[in-house]
């Protein structure tokens, strides 16, 4: 890993390994890569670095994603970051599957029809009944998710895309 020395020089002890999405316009060459191979290489060459992997609960079936999680654990993943959740019931199912693992649960407000279309089309998401693309709905859900992760003694991260951070966090902790 040619960049590993730079990580050590900068005092970086934890990394998140994920494959990401190809560029929308495909304007540059994309090489096939596999996050599992990179996790394995990180842990083999730099076992002192804590490696987190991604969970995409919308990518495929739950069974296939669970198998993917097990492969990442076998490769040496120390924990996981999820894609943002929008439904507490789905979080509860994943919490059962991920019991005993270090997980950073994602929450991201979706406050426009354009964002709804993106999540439904690109990520194959089905929003829960009663979902509204409003700041109020998203803040209510974020508070529920925060309480849920506190009860699990787990981590949560917020990804306020196209939402002012001060407004979102201010509404969350008022």
Image (spheres, helix red, strand yellow):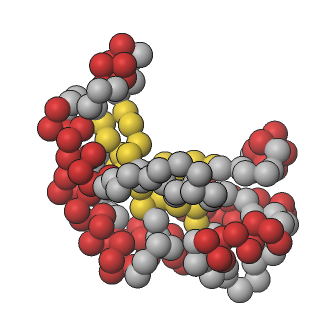
Do we see residue 170 in this rendering?
no
Out of 58 and 23, give the one closest to the viewer: 23
Q: Is residue 4 above or below residue 106?
A: above
Whole-percent x, y for residue 115 in the image: 75, 66
Q: Is residue 112 above or below residue 8?
A: below
How many discs mark residues in the rendered view? 0
Whole-percent x, y for residue 11 in the image: 38, 17
Q: Write the residue at 36% across / 23% down.
A: 7
Whether residue 60 sits left or right of residue 110 in the image: it is: left
Q: Write the residue at 43% across / 77% down.
A: 60
Whole-percent x, y for residue 101 in the image: 31, 55
Q: Which residue lies most toward the top here?
A: 9
- Which image quadrant for residue 166? top right
Q: Write the residue at 52% across / 57% down.
A: 22
Do we see residue 51 in this rendering?
yes
Whether residue 73 sits left or right of residue 110 in the image: it is: left
Q: Which residue lies most toward the left here?
A: 44
Whether residue 117 sits left or right of residue 74 in the image: it is: right
Q: Which residue lies most toward the bottom here?
A: 129
């Amino acid at each position: 890993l040619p960049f590993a020395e730079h990580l050590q020089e900068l005092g970086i002890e934890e990394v998140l390994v994920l494959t990401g999405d190809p560029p929308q316009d495909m304007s540059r060459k994309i090489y096939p890569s596999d996050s599992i191979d990179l996790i394995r290489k990180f842990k083999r060459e730099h076992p002192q670095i804590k490696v987190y992997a991604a969970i995409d609960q919308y990518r495929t079936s739950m069974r296939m994603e669970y198998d993917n999680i097990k492969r990442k654990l076998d490769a040496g993943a120390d924990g996981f970051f999820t894609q943002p959740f929008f439904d507490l019931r789905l979080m509860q199912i994943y919490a059962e599957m991920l019991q005993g693992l270090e997980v950073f649960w994602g929450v991201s407000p979706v406050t426009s029809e354009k964002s709804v279309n993106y999540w439904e089309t690109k990520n194959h998401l089905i929003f829960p009944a009663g979902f509204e693309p409003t700041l109020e709905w998203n803040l209510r859900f974020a508070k529920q998710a925060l309480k849920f992760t506190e009860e699990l003694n787990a981590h949560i991260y917020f990804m306020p895309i196209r939402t002012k951070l001060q407004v979102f966090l201010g509404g969350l902790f008022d």
